[in-house]
Structure formats: structure tokens, C-alpha cells
Image: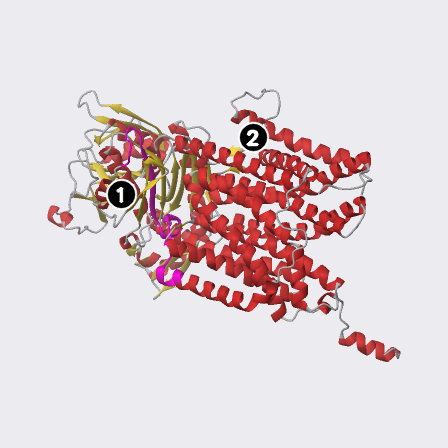
Amino acid sequence: MLDFPLWKKLMLWGITLAAVIAALPSLTNSAGIDWPDELPDPMVNLGLDLAGGSHLLLEAEVREIGAQQLENMEETVRREMRGATPRIRIGDISTRDGQLSFILSEAADIDRARGLLEPYIMGDGLTREWDLEVVDTQRMVLTPTEQGLEARIDDAMESATEVVRRRIDDLGTREPTIIRQGDTRIVVQVPGLEDPDALKDLLGQTAQLEFKLVDKDALPSNVQAGIAPPGSQIVPYAPGTGFEGQFEAVERLGGIRGDSLTNAQAGVDPQTNENVVDITFDAQGGARFAKLSTENVGERFAIILDGEVISAPYFRERILGGRAQISGSFTAESANNLAISLRSGALPVPLTVIEERTVGPDLGADSIRRGMIAMLIGSLAVIALMMATYGRFGVYATIALVFNVAMLLGIMAVLNTTLTLPGIAGFVLTVGAAVDANVLINERIREERKRGRKVVTAVETGYKEASRAIYDANITNFISAVLLGLFGSGPIRGFAVVLILGLFTSVFTALPLTRMWVAGWLRKTRPADLNI
Amino acid sequence: MRLLKLVPADTNIKFLKLRVPFFFASVLLVAASWGLVFFNGLNLGVDFAGGQEIQATFTDSAEAPVPELRESIGAIEGVGDPVVQRFGEANQVSIRVKLPPEAEGNPAFADELTTRITGALEAGYDDIQIDAVNSVSGKVSGEFRQDAILALLAAMVAVALYIWIRFEWQFGAGALFALFHDVSLTLGLFALFQLEFSLQIIAAILAIIGYSLNDTIVVFDRIRENLKKYRKMQLPELLDLSINETLARTVMTSLTLLVALLPLLLFGPASLFGLVAAITFGLFVGTYSSVYLAAPILIWLGVTSNSFVPQESEADRQEKIARGEA
């Protein structure tokens, strides 16, 4: 018991001091003192519930991805069949029930058609993306495979995450966190955000921009009744355009998508004084736009944003420079938002906010202040109780407690974990429970003394017999805290992290550390009796 | 210096004399708790019910206009019956709105409603400062419910298994029953007083499971030690001895936890009140259940002093006979 080799002492003190030093930057920071830049500065992060900020959980509407995939395939089929020599004639194309089906006019073309579609069916060559079936000798049915759809969703989520990141960066906020979660979700955390609504507006806009020709042959009465002529679709006007409740019939295929933009800027049209967004196409998009406008001078086309018409002007002339202007009853703010969204690219899939947690900076600061005061009072009460009950041994337990809290903070800083509001409760709980180990040991020493054991033997037995229960109790605590961390989210996980790390630091400070101090004292003074 | 002795040196309280009435009282309390949970229901917060919880401060007012808010927010389309309460200071409120049935299958509804409510608040009051917004859609709240139940069950089973491995199956069963009792009574408390039941309360219950088990383990550890030491002692007497021997520690540890938690309960942030209140309550039931439930169950499950002595298996016996030793 009394024998504590030097290497053991050095190791214990080394671990303790290293963890305590790691806590210093966090402590000085919260006291408002600058930590020298030259030194490493591990820091405990404050959760959004303490620092203030917004946490948004976004979910993608993946049904849209399936629909898009079918639409793209339909265009591919039409293009390939038209481009084949000799041309393969097809008809009765439909995209119902998540399948693309069409009829070949000549059954003899089946093998040629299959050959043309083969590269698309195999996708990137690793996963089969479509199943191709021939029904009644002439009808081809294409069904997306599960792996194919999954791959599409995965691609869409990857690029959606990237788009979300670009949009938030454009807002100029500091250190946002954007992480993909699970198959179809994105977590966005923006600290210190003043206006979460602006952020949500920006993320709520898919910004799928389309230019489609207005079907000039459609009967206005049919269009308003929602009946689309063959090959066309009915699109409603967006709110705020002055045409709410009205519809346009536009040609389904042959339009241009806004994903081939290189720039978008909000501005004001000098002639009309309207808010507009000026867009610039890339070379390919510019060429397609030039072709569309050349072939359709004098015709109307619809500018469609996220499935709603924002305006339907005429092609007054050929547009060759790859630049265009979008107008549609914008305010300065909505024009700017649209410009940001278009610049950052369209979201490949609409996102919905399914969970929001926003905390203002004042509330967080107040929580920290109240938490700190409560922890201070609580710690002083625990210390007073321990000293009054166990005397010298209570003093050792107290010093261990102080090291415990500092080490816990230091380890959290090194591991770069986040302190949340429930985490503060975790700290207080750790303070209250950490001394349990010392209580167990000290009570055991009392008992052993009462049974008449000599001082050194009593202390030795106390540590030895108590440690079994201490380890068992901490392991079960560890089990329940780990399960909490696994199932809990955000702030709750912060609580679990403090509890788990606190278990390690309190076992360390309560067992080997106090034992080293007690052993040192016993060896030096050799007391004949213990006041415990 | 004379040291404080909270528990006199040689207590000899006959805890187990009253084990049957206490046990029945506990079973009754557990049944009553579940009755309350099923008939009264838990007052589920937004985490589990979905909806909005908005905290706001009226910076230039002495008092928040609670009745007026109740009316004006209740009038917003899609809001059923809002719960508006003072929260923290007199000029601070918490507004809770549950998701209406039409939100079913429309994950975007919760967010639209949030925008409507915060918009109306900001338009209606010049000095309002929105401190916090929690908005949870039905989909997410459903997942939280599922995760919470899984976490509670998994934690109880996992720690009971650990105790079974470290001690004997009877000890595992005793600990599991004591935990079930603690969790049930905490749920009953929340159902009785209709306190908001949130994710934080699940965290509190898991912490209770951990700390209630501390007590149980300390008592069990002493029982095991005494079973080996006093092989001839009657079990009830031995359990009483073990509980009395660890009584000073039980009282002291409960007290240190209590004095650490009380300031947080009284002066801590308002948003932590539920969590800390639940843990404080759990502290009492956990200590009680370790003494009056976990230990007596050992008698009924037939723990004997032989439980920790390696038993002679049938194979060992055959071998001995074969060697002619028996």
C-alpha cells in the first residue's frame, strides 16, 4: 500500500496535469482572457443550445427523384429512337406506375431498340439501373431497379448537400456545419444565426429553372380546366405574379433546364424599373437557348421555377449571347434569393425542414451563467459535506473532485466534443456522484478500523474491498450512458458524453490519485490512529 | 476535530422485517403508475408529440400577456389549443402547440406552422424577442418515440445482464425489478402532475437507471461478501446486516448527489428543470428500491450461501465416483 514507485507517481501526475492543461484554453476563453496564438488551443465546443444558433434537419422528397429519372429516360428513348438509322418509330409512351412503357411500330425493330438502350440500362456498368421487358412482342417496359434508384438518390443527396453548403456560404455565416445523415437527410447547424427564416427560405427553394415553349394550340378553356393537350403539361402560375390561379400549357419536352448556368445576378431593369435576375448560360446551354429562340421567334415561352410559371414572355428576337433576363414580379429580396439559389445550382430534389431547433444568443448565455452558479454552489456543498464527514480523507476527495472537473473539461477539449445544456446537468451529476467512490472507500476504512485493524491495513483493505463495487457500479453506469448516447440526438448526446467521460475521470481521480496521496501521507507521518 | 457521523456507528435496523408489506406497497405503486400513464396519459412535449415549442421574452414589459397570447395564437389557422405558460422570469413565456391531425403525412406542415406562429408573434408585439424555437414534424417525433422506448428497454436489459454475469441470476432479476420500479414510478410522477415529458426526461431516466444501480450494486456486493463470510447465517438476517453495514455510504452518497442537484433545480436554467427534477425524484426511489426491492427478492428467488461456492456438477461427481473417491 505504502509502496508507490516513482514511475507510477510520475505517470499519474503526468496524466492529471496533461488533462488539466488541456482544459486551460477553454477556461481562459470563458473568462474572456486571450490564449496565446502560438500555443495549441484545444477547445470545448459550445452546443447551439448554449451558443445560440439554428439546427435544421432537412429531408429530401425522394419520390421526385424517381419521377425525374423516368422523365430523363423518356427523353433518352425518344432521342435514341429518332436518331437511329433508319429511324425507329415508337408510340403510346407512358410513365405511369413508376414504369416507362412504349410501343414499337415494327416488332422487327425490337433487337435494334434493345441494343440502343443497353448502355443506359447498365448505367455506369457496375449496377444494373433498369430492367427491360418486352410485352406482347411490341411493347417495351423499362422499370428502374432498386439499386439504380438508390444510386440516383445517393447522387442527388451528395449534390444536394453540396448545394446547401454553397447557399449557406453565400449567406456569409460563420462556421456552418452541413452533414448528410442517413439516406435522405441533411443536418444543417449554423451558430449565431440572427434570422433562421432567411435560411429556411433559401433552402426551401429548389431553384429548378426551366424554359419551356408555350403550347400555342392548346384551347384556353381546356387549359384552365387542367386538361393538357397531348405532349403538353399544365403548369400553374406562381403566387405574386398577378396571374395566380391561372395556368399555362407548355410542351413537355424540348425545353432547357437552368442547370447549365454559369452566373446569376439580381438587378433592376433600367426600362421597366422591375427587379430582375440576369442569368448567363454556359456554352452548351447558350447554344441550346440560341437554337430554341431562333426556331421560335415570335412565340411565347414560359419561365418555370420549381414547377410554377413566373412569367411567359415572347421570344422577340434570337438570343445568341448566352445571356437572358428573368422577370416575374420580384421584390429586391426575392430576386436576390433567387440569384443566390441559381448561382449555387438547383437542388436536385426538394428539401423539407422536418425538425428545427433555434436558440437565441441571450438565452444560451443565460443558461451558461445559471448553470455555472448552480454548479459552484453544488460543488461547495459537496466539498463541505465531504470535509465535515471524513476530515483529512475528505480533503483528499475534494482535491480529487477539483482535478476531476478540470480533467473532464480538458479531455472534452482534446476530443473536440460539444458541451450542451443537458451536458451542464451532466457536469453537476458527475460532481455529485464522483465522490461516491471516496465515500465507499472511506466508509470501508472506518469499518476496518472499528474491527480493530491497524491503520495501514485498514486503509489498504478499504481501497481493495471498495474497488470491486466501484468498478461494477461505473461499468453499469457506462452501459446506460452509452445506450443514451447511441439513441439520443444532439443535446441529449451531449449529456451522455459528459457522463461517460466523467465516469473515467472520476474513477481515475478517486482511486489511484487519492490512494497516492493517502499513501504519501501515511508513509511520512506513520499515524497510530486515524480520525475518520 | 470531531467528524460528522450522519449514521450512528452500529445500526441494526430490521429492514427486512417489513419486506412483505413494503413489497406489496411497491407493486401497488408500480401498478398505480402504469394506470396513470394509460388513463391520465403522459403530457408529451414537442419531441414526442410533434409541434412547436417557442420561448419568448417581452423585453419592455413587466409581465408577459399570457391570456392574450393564448387567444391570438389559438386563432392562427392550424393551431388547436396552444399551451401558453410563464417560463422563467415574469416577462418570459413558453408557447406549446401540438400538431393537428391534418399534419399527418405532410412533413412540411410543422415548419409552415412555425413560420405562421413566429410571424404572428413578431407582427403583434413590438418588444417580443424570440429566444428559442423547437419545431418537430410528426415523422421525427415518431422516430424519437421509438428510439426512447428502445433506449430504455435496452439499458434495463443490458445492465441486468451485466449484473447476472457479475453476480448470479437472482441478483440480475432483483436489479431488473428494482429498475422497473424506479422507471415506472418516474413515469407515474410525470403522468400524475402532467409535467412535460420530453427527450430530456428519457435522459434523466437513463441516468436514474445508472445511479439507482449504484446503490443496488453496493448492497449486492456486500451481500456476496457476507454470504461467503457467514455461511451459517439466515438469509434475512444476512441481508439486514449487509444493508446496515452499507447504510452510512448509502445515506452519504444520496446526500452528496442531492446537495449537488438542488442548486441546479432551484437556480438553474428553466429548460433543465424537468431533467433535474426527474433525477432528484429518481434518487429517492432508487435508494428505496435497492433496499426494499432488490434485496428481498433474493430471499424469494432462493439465494443461499452456496450460490457463490463453485458447485459440484454431475460430471464432476461421476468422475469422482469413477476414481473411487466418493
- Dot 1 falls on a residue whose secondary structure is loop
Q: Quadrant of residue B307?
A: bottom right
Give the answer, above or below, for where A77 lies relative to B226: above
Cα separation between marks 2 and 1: 46 Å
Q: For mark 2, name the chain.
A: A
Q: Which residue is mark 1?
A: A307
Residue A473 percent location from the top left of the image: 63, 52
The residue lying toward the viewer, choosing from A107 and A262, is A262
Question: Is residue A112 in view?
Answer: no
Q: Which residue is mark 2?
A: A43
Residue A168 percent location from the top left of the image: 40, 32
Q: Amino acid at mark 2?
A: Met
Disc 2, disc 1: CB below 8 Å? no
- Dot 2 falls on a residue whose secondary structure is loop
User: Dot 1, how many residues are within 10 Å of its Cα: few (below 14), some (14-19), or many (20+)?
Assistant: some
The residue lying toward the viewer, choosing from A478 and A439, is A439
User: Dot 2, how many residues are within 10 Å of its Cα: few (below 14), some (14-19), or many (20+)?
Assistant: many
Segment colored magenta: B36-64
Q: Quadrant of residue A50?
A: top left
The residue lying toward the viewer, choosing from B52 and A173, is B52
